[in-house]
Structures are given as structure tokens and as C-alpha cells.
Amino acid sequence: MSVFAVARNAFLESIRQPVFVVLLVVGILALVLNVNLAAFAFEDDSKLLIDLGLSTLFIVGILLAAFNATGVLSKEIESKTVLTVVSKPVSRAALVIGKYLGVAAAIALGFWVLAAVFLLAVRHRVQAGVRMEDTFDLPVLVFSLLFGGLALLVAGLANYLYRRPFPSTFAVSLAVALTAALGIVWCVSRDWAFQDPRVEWDPQLMIALGLVFEAVLVLAAVAIAASTRLGQVMTLAVCLGVFLVGLVSEYFLGTVVAAPADAQSPSSFVRLVAWPLYAAIPNLQFFWSADALTQGNPMTIGYFAAVSLYAALVVGAVISLAVLLFQHRDVG
């Protein structure tokens, strides 16, 4: 039970941070602006919109992971408040695992808010003409603004009348409101006629969203591991470094490891050095499916399951490393 108690506290602490709401608002604005930016594509606007949207989700997800991890762990270590927890019958392993679960739950909440906005933006599409019905998807605009404003009103009233924390109340209210808006919009066509919601359902797009979310969870584990020894700035730097290296590891290390044994292939020493690096660094290319999605290459459930298993193994390994790093950390 101690793990779930720590996880619940970490979740509430994460969504109550002002930076959590700030990143959500920045991500929402970026996703909305992507609709206009995608209009400058020379070919298929919708492909660029999807590419920009997934990239936005990836980057904002990394920032959420890094800031939440440092907020719930490294700051507690620096302020010595974590000493009151480990001095009780709560093991350090349970503390680290609970912190990760809480951060992962907070990231899931924030990611769903951004994913809902992304799906609404995909439904809205890029301007296709000069007529009103070609320029704007009125059901998307009406229900998004209506429910978004309602979430803001609920959070404001809860803060004013009941002293509820505004960031956490707004985040939860926004998740519920945008879910309702998305459900209604999927049942209404652009010309305000009822339609089967399955018309808007794109399994390939949902798989792509799931893969990006799993990549963010992997980086959240990296952020928790880094937070056991480093401060906020260095944790952000580590997350950024793993993100950049993970995107190019397949090209620079994977090709070396998979090269055939001939005269033109890398030497045995180079392979010996490249193999452990390639195995240790999370390969984020597995999670990035925007290229396959925009090029019309279908992703199967089998591929999603294989990548999900890989993500679970990486998260387990990184969290195990985090537990080892925190075992002998002086918190007094």
C-alpha cells in the first residue's frame, strides 16, 4: 500500500505544479497553430499537420516528464523533506517506484488533454478553400471553445469558492471537458448532421499516439533516475540528451551492429563498443511512427505489442537503476 500512497501523493503534487498547466496551455496553443502552419505544405496538408502534431506531443511530453520528476523527487531531496518519508516504514525502492507511477499518471492526464486537442485539430483540417465551410469546422470550434471555457470556469469557481488548487482542478476539468467535446464532434459532421463516430476513428493514428505516449513514459523513467542524483537543470539536460541520442542511435549505432562481416564492415573493436551502447540507449525511433503514418505504411497490432513490450522492459531497467542510485543517496 505504501507504493500506491506515494504514487497518489506524487500524482497530486505533479498536477498542482503551475508549470504543469503552463506546459498544457503552451502545448494546446502550439497544436492550434499547427493547423495554420500546415497550410504552407506544397503537397498534402494533413500529413504535415499530423507530423507537427505528433512532434508537439513528443516535445511537450518530455518537458512534462522532466519537470514533474524533478518536482516530486529532486526538490524533495534538496529540501530534505524526503527524509520524513524514508524514516518511516517506506522502503527507498517503494518511494522511487511510487514517484514514477505518480508522475506517469500525471503525464497520462496531460497527454490525453493534448491528444484530444490534436484529434480535434486533425478533424478540423487545414483550410481547403475560401468559403466559410472550407475554412472552419464550426462544430469543432463551437464545442471546443464551449467546453474549454466551461473547464476554465469550473476551475476558477472551485478555487474562489472552495480554495481548490487551480492548476490541478483546471487540468482534470479540461481533460473531462475535451473528452466530451471530442465525443460530440465525432458524432456531428462539418455541416451539423449526425454521423457514425467511427467515421472519425483512425486506428493508425491511435497507434501512433500510443507509441508517442510510451516514449514519453520511457523518458519519464529516465527523468526519475536522473532526479535521484541531479537537480532540475541537469535532469532536463539528461532528458534532452537521451531524447536526441535515442532518435539517432539506430542510424549511428544500429547500422554498425547490424553491418555484415566483410572487409568494408566496421572492425570487431568498433562493434564491441557500439553493441552495449546500442543496447543501453533507448531507441526512440521505434516509437516514432509519423513517417510511416504520413507515407501510408500501415502499422500492425503486432508491431504495437512488440514496441510496448520493449517500452516496458526499458522502463523496468531504468527504474531498477533509479532504485540502485537512490539506495545509497544521502538524504539527511
Image (cartoon, helix red, strand yellow):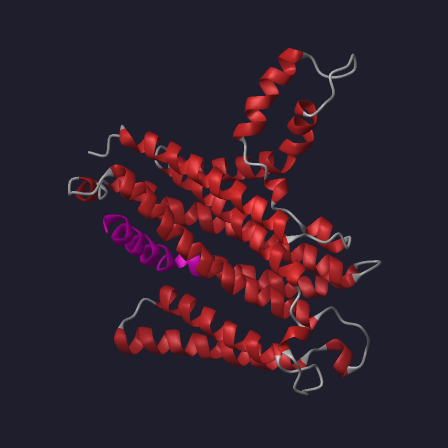
Closer to us: 298 or 328: 298
Q: Is residue 139 above or below residue 279?
A: below
Q: Please identify the dominant SS of the magenta region.
A: helix
Q: Residue at x 34, y 36 (%)?
A: 228
Q: Residue at x 64, y 83 (%)?
A: 188
Per the rendered image, the range of residues in magenta is: 1-21
Closer to us: 17 or 202: 202
Q: Is residue 30 above or below residue 255?
A: below
Q: Where in the figure is residue 270, as x and y percent of width and height?
A: 64, 15
**Number of marks in the image?**
0
Q: Where in the figure is residue 46, as x and y percent of width and height?
A: 74, 63
- Queried whether the magenta region covers residue 10, the answer comes back as yes
Identity of the residue furthest to the bottom in this view: 193
- Which corner quadrant of the image does residue 48 belong to? bottom right
Q: Residue at x 40, y 50 (%)?
A: 68
- Which corner quadrant of the image does residue 269 belong to? top right
